[in-house]
């Protein structure tokens, strides 16, 4: 009987721990912002898209297009190969519920000037997701 009680207690603790691990995967905006900046700086397409919905809009030095997460991964891998990242710096972080806009600069090898980076996050079901990534040449519009 005593053994059964300890087994039940152990199972309850395990269940609570597993629930915490699942809940802990949803990223708050500040945490996701850091993940996105680090992924851009490393040229890590897979990490960049981990918190993206099934379709994400990419505009890399041109017109935007909607891609599946897998397609976007390959497009980003090609971009990072052509423009290897050196450094990424966020300059603005604006919240306009349910969106959050991140604006920054992307320095790459052989760059005379950095690219401008724009990311749009969307808050849905308690989770922030990357919905759009734009990289443009030239100065940001104010």
Image (tube, rainbow, N blue to C red):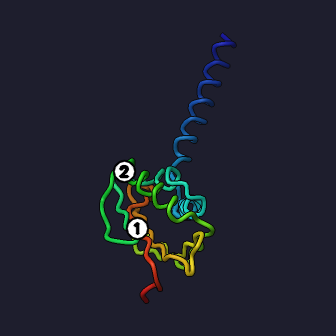
User: Where's the C terminus, which quadrant?
Assistant: bottom left
What percent of the width, then of the height, locates residue 35? 57, 58
Label 2 Cα neighbours within 10 Å, binned few <14 / some 14-19 / many ≥20: few
* Left or right: where 78 falls relative to 114: left
Nearer to us in this view, 71 or 24: 71
* Quarter location, residue 4: top right
- SS of the residue under disc 2: helix
Against 83, residue 67 (above or below) is above
What percent of the width, then of the height, locates residue 67? 32, 55
Q: Residue furthest bottom?
A: 142
- Residue visible at 59% across and 63% down in the picture: 41
Q: Residue furthest top?
A: 1
Circle 1 is placed at which residue position? 60
* Left or right: where 42 falls relative to 62: right
* Quarter location, residue 34: bottom right
Against 140, residue 110 (above or below) is above
Q: Which mark is residue 71?
A: 2
What percent of the width, then of the height, locates residue 111? 57, 76
What percent of the width, then of the height, locates residue 30? 56, 64
Label 1 Cα neighbours within 10 Å, binned few <14 / some 14-19 / many ≥20: some
- Residue visible at 46% across and 84% down in the picture: 140
Q: Which mark is residue 68?
A: none
- SS of the residue under disc 1: strand
- Residue visible at 64% across and 25% down in the picture: 9
- Residue visible at 30% across and 59% down in the picture: 66
């Amino acid at each position: 009987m005593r053994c059964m009680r300890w087994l039940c207690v152990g199972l309850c603790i395990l269940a609570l721990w597993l629930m915490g691990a699942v809940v802990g995967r949803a990223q708050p905006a500040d945490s996701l912002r850091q993940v996105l900046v680090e992924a851009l700086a490393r040229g890590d397409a897979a990490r960049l898209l981990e918190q993206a919905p099934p379709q994400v809009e990419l505009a890399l030095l041109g017109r935007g297009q909607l891609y599946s997460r897998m397609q976007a991964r390959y497009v980003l891998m090609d971009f990072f190969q052509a423009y290897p990242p050196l450094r990424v710096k966020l300059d603005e972080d604006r919240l306009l519920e349910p969106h959050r806009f991140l604006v920054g600069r992307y320095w790459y090898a052989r760059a005379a000037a950095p690219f401008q980076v724009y990311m749009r996050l969307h808050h849905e079901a308690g989770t922030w997701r990357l919905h759009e990534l734009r990289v443009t040449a030239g100065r940001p519009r104010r």
